[in-house]
Amino acid sequence: MHKVSTFTLKIPRDLTEASLSGAGLSIVAALAMIFLFGMELSTYLAVTTNTSVIVHNSSDGDFLRIDFNVRRVDLL
């Protein structure tokens, strides 16, 4: 019994020939990937601080009570 492997299969010639439009598309895709990687890396390395407090109204219109327990020894 003959075992067929992917190394023995023949690829059609039109899929293996280089073309100018294929080369251009490959270059544009590579540049786009490098640009996107650079943008993601710069965003990841950027230090940002975002602080927000949102108070949600309850269904009867009262505000949610929030108590902060701050001790003086925590501030030193």
Image: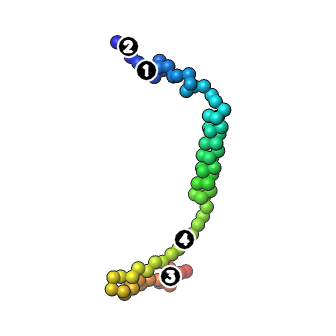
Spatial CA distance of label 1 from label 2 is 10 Å
Q: Secondary structure at mark 3?
A: helix
**Amino acid marked by disc 2:** His
**Amino acid marked by disc 1:** Ser
Residues at marks 3 and 2 touching, judged by CB atoms closer than 8 Å: no
Left or right: residue 32 compared with residue 3 = right
Q: Secondary structure at mark 4?
A: loop
Where does label 1 land, which residue? 5
Residue that extends furthest to the left in the rendered view of this protein: 60
Where does label 2 land, which residue? 2
**Amino acid marked by disc 3:** Val
Q: Which of the two discs, 2 and 4, labels the residue nearer the N terminus?
A: 2
Q: Nearer the viewer, residue 25 or 44?
A: 25
Q: Secondary structure at mark 1?
A: loop
* Position of residue 32 measured from the top left corner of the image (x, y, whole percent): 62, 47
Spatial CA distance of label 3 from label 2 is 81 Å
Q: Residue at x 38, y 16 (%)?
A: 3
* Position of residue 39 measured from the top left corner of the image (x, y, whole percent): 61, 54
Tag of residue 73: 3
